[in-house]
Amino acid sequence: MEVFKKTSNVFNILSEAVSEGIIIVNKEQIIVATNESANELFGYKQGELEGKPLEILIPKNYHHTHSRHVSGFLKNSDKRKMGHGRDLYGARKDGSSFPVEAGLNPFTIYGNDYVMALITDITVRKKAEQELRHWANIFEESLNEIFIFDAETLKFINANSGAQNNIGYTLDELIQLTPVNIKPDFNEDEFRAYINPLLKNTLPKLKFNTIHQRKDGSTYPVEVHLQKSRIGNKDTLVAIILDITERVNYTEKLEKTVEKRTLQLQEALQVEKELNDLKTKFLSLVSHEFKTPLSGILSSSTLIGKYTSTEQQDKRLKHVNTIKNKVKYLNNIINDFLSIERLDRGKVNYKFSQFSLSKVINEVIYDANMLLKQGQKIVYPENIDDIVIEFDEKILELILNNLISNAIKYSPEETTIKVSAIVVDSKMKIEIIDSGIGIPKEEQKHVFNRYFRAENALITQGTGIGLNIVKSHLENLGGTITFTSEQNKGTTFTVTIPTSKTTHKL
């Protein structure tokens, strides 16, 4: 230390001109000199560090390794940076520590070996490096795709792992490409025109949805966030890409659900409208179909009272029969309504039995003869006396009654209604053929709808529910009903029923 003081004036002049902290130690690692910058750096006064061991300037947790590194350095006696590849820290007088960079320079004076350490406080640099590493980690580890490309050439400069993994290209492959190579919806002119507002600084950023194409040719929807940046003196563009496959799938699913629910709502509203129409038709039907016979009953009841003498018995009987017929008509209407109600609730109990077909047809035609108009006649089916079927007799009677009475009702005077019956492939086929007004072609699809009546039949009494009842019973029993019709030429209804109970649908 005494030897070193001989040259202290020279040291002081030189060291104070240097901005780095200078600390000189001997081979025993005792501090022999410091400059003002070093004193300020470590928080000591001039001369306060001289004669102190170097360890006073090193945090305690580094003491063990520091002594070994300095000893090794003195043996090698070459200029170098201490702690290369490791973080070095200095300890201030107040106990705080801070990162440092140390350049070590060995020298010899008067046969004694010394080391001069140039100490630089790198706190600001370390913070900047940490922030840089932090942002580099964010860039590299982001789950979103991040691309950086040259604003002039459009060539990719960098891409994070998320981008490379999803797009399928390595970074070496990407730097040979441009965004246009992975965006099938754009050509180069279109893309340059699209990013031009960013390059001219008229927009701070761009956000748009497009499609990206992977190396394997597959595509996926993306949301692109594009901003201008700069690397050195070069303008660049940074693209943050969000893979929105799940969002698009969810949106499409939601749209389909909304579309489906809208359709269901429309269908429900249509059903409700149809129900309201049915209610309106029903009320109109009831008021009309009940009013006419009730008026007849009221008139005949009133007139009966006027015929009091014995010789007026024929007139009384005429009105009594009118009342009976009107009451029977009303009773049939009520029975039809009750049949509909039972069918709707599934409360119809069918009773099967074996019976002769001719028996039922005879009874139906006998009753129908009472309804015939002037000159009308019914042609009885041939060769049915030996036909025995297993079916619900009352239902078959209801079906034939309805079809034959309709044929009479909608046919003019002096016409013929023909009934035929034949067994085909274990099924009974019965046809009722008339030469009546027929059903308009455009209205034929509605014939079996409840309360429907064709335009050319509105002036004739009827509820429009008979054919609906017939069809419902036949469907329940495994049968069918079809028809052919031509307006003003007539209609043929064909009923097919199984001849064995085993084929019935209950």
Image (cartoon, rainbow, N blue to C red):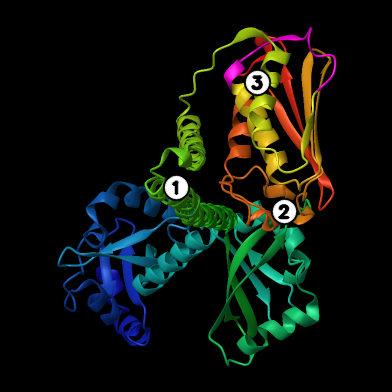
Nearer the camera: disc 2 or disc 1:
1
Residue at 38 percent across and 43 percent down: it is: 308
Residue 395, percent from left and from top: 59, 22
On the rendered image, what quadrant is the N terminus found in? bottom left
Decide whether residue 314 is among the magenta residues.
no
The segment highlighted magenta reads: 381-394
How many neighbours does mark 3 have within 10 angstroms: few (below 14), some (14-19), or many (20 or more)? few
> Which corner quadrant of the image does residue 202 belong to?
bottom right
Residue at 23 percent across and 76 percent down: it is: 39
Residue at the spot of label 1 = 300
Q: Secondary structure at mark 1?
A: helix
Residue at the spot of label 3 = 363
Residue 352, percent from left and from top: 59, 11
Residue at the spot of label 2 = 443
The amino acid sitting under disc 3 is Glu
On the rendered image, what quadrant is the C terminus found in? top right
The amino acid sitting under disc 1 is Ser
Q: Earlier in the sequence, mark 2 or mark 1?
A: 1
Up the image or down, 310 lies above or below 158; here it is: above
Position of residue 240 in the picture relative to residue 24 (left or right)? right
Residue at 79 percent across and 82 percent down: it is: 189
Report the Cα–Cα distance between label 1 and label 3.
Answer: 29 Å
